[in-house]
Amino acid sequence: MIVTLTPNPSVDRAVVVDRLRRGEVHRASSTHVDPGGKGVNVSRALAARGSATVAVLPVGGPEGRLLVQLLDEAGVASRGVPIAGSVRTNISVLDVDGTTTKINEAGPRLLPDDVATLLDATLAEFAGTGWIVGCGSLPPGAPVGLYASLVEAGRAVGARVAVDSSGPSMAAALAARPHLVKPNHEELEELAGRELATLGDVRDEALRLVDAGIETVAVSLGGDGALLVDAETTVHARAHVSAPVSTVGAGDCMLAGLLDALAAGLDQSAALAAAVRSGSAAVALPGSSVPTPQDLADVAVDVDTSPTLGRRLGR
Ligand SMILES: Nc1ncnc2c1ncn2[C@@H]1O[C@H](COP(=O)(O)OP(=O)(O)O)[C@@H](O)[C@H]1O
Ligand SMILES: O=P(O)(O)OC[C@H]1O[C@](O)(COP(=O)(O)O)[C@@H](O)[C@@H]1O
């Protein structure tokens, strides 16, 4: 069982325009509405492949009702914690040339009781084995140490705990030593405070986190795939996508593939291959659609257990 906690979920609205021009009226050629927020997406990706998961999230306002309805329709089990404010709507504008512009709202304010109830609900959904995953930004009112509290509480009930966040909440979570973290390239650079131009730079920085007590660091690298580092292994995996459609939520699908594979007992190389298969399959789908088993079957992944560390990374 993989329980996800998304303190700041969203309704994701993706619109396609010819070319985004500041200050002009645009006519969208298509619109895609998905349930959103990083942990919600991890649960959606897991449910789509038939893996056991529950998404824990605050729910309020008309957007909250829509979010729960969309999750129900997608067959994703969720546990909503009622809040006074309204769930946010995040907008992605996709140019036909593939450029994506995202506008993420701050989200509704959480009260201290809401935060405590979210943590309690997450632990209550944990069935005794498997993973608890905390993902995404924190809304106003949530303490910066929310994910650190999740790591400590999760560890106390015997869960393996993963965190995917950024900025101060991620830095605070690292101090609590989650079992796994999944920064993307930019987030790892932010943590490192320097540019990470090559695979070797990423490996060195990931190893620094491993040395600080985090068992597994999986860094998603966009079109360059992903690098997994632990005390024994450095493995790189990559898949070519000939026609990328939307990268929104690809990192969440990548994390879902990784945790699902680790929970099934696969080794690090096989788990990273599954992760990249999932992330890259998502890139070929519109909005933040999650891949079905058929979509996953279509992706060929190259895995390298002795990657060329001098390899320069694109953006
Ligand atoms: N252009 C691309 N071509 C192929 N795979 C991609 C591409 N962009 C992303 N991916 C896949 O999606 C995963 C997550 O992408 P990334 O952009 O690093 O995550 P995030 O959404 O967290 O920023 C990557 O590890 C890779 O497997
Ligand atoms: O919590 P944040 O950082 O604002 O991100 C939330 C957004 O991220 C997503 O999970 C997508 O992930 P990416 O932006 O990493 O592709 C959306 O569903 C959601 O709108």
Image (cartoon, helix red, strand yellow):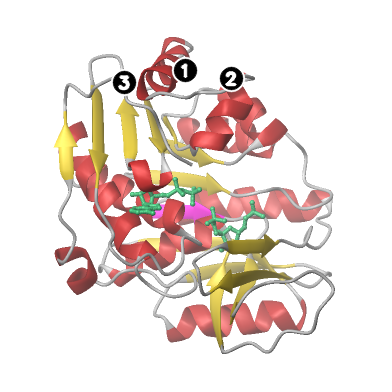
Q: Earlier in the sequence, mark 1 or mark 2?
A: 2
Query: Along the line of sight, which residue is nearer the eye, 289 or 168?
Result: 289
Q: Is residue 11 magenta?
A: no
For label 1, the crowd category at 10 Å Cα-Cα, with few meaning under 14, some 14 to 19 and many 20 or more, is many
Q: Is residue 265 visible?
A: no
Ligand 1 within 8 Å, label 3 CB? no
Label 2 sits on residue? 192
Residue 112 vertical position relative to residue 159 in the rendered view, above or below: below
In x, y percent, where is residue 159? 40, 38
| Callouts 3 and 1 close, C-beta under 8 Å | no
In x, y percent, where is residue 305? 16, 26
Residue 205 image label: 1
Q: Is residue 4 magenta?
A: yes
In x, y percent, where is residue 60? 74, 74
Q: Nearer the viewer, mark 2 or mark 3?
A: 2
| Callouts 1 and 2 close, C-beta under 8 Å | yes
In x, y percent, where is residue 113? 79, 52
Q: Which residues are magenta?
A: 1-5
Seen at 41% across and 40% down, the residue is 221
Residue 175 vertical position relative to residue 295 in the rendered view, above or below: above
| Secondary structure that dominates the magenta span | strand
Q: Nearer the viewer, mark 3 or mark 1?
A: 1
Residue 298 vertical position relative to residue 7 in the rendered view, above or below: below
Seen at 18% across and 73% down, the residue is 294
Q: Secondary structure at mark 1?
A: helix
Label 3 sits on residue? 230
For label 3, the crowd category at 10 Å Cα-Cα, with few meaning under 14, some 14 to 19 and many 20 or more, is many
Alpha-carbon distance for marks 2 and 3? 17 Å
Res 103 → quadrant: bottom right
Query: Along the line of sight, which residue is nearer the eye, 276 or 270?
Result: 276
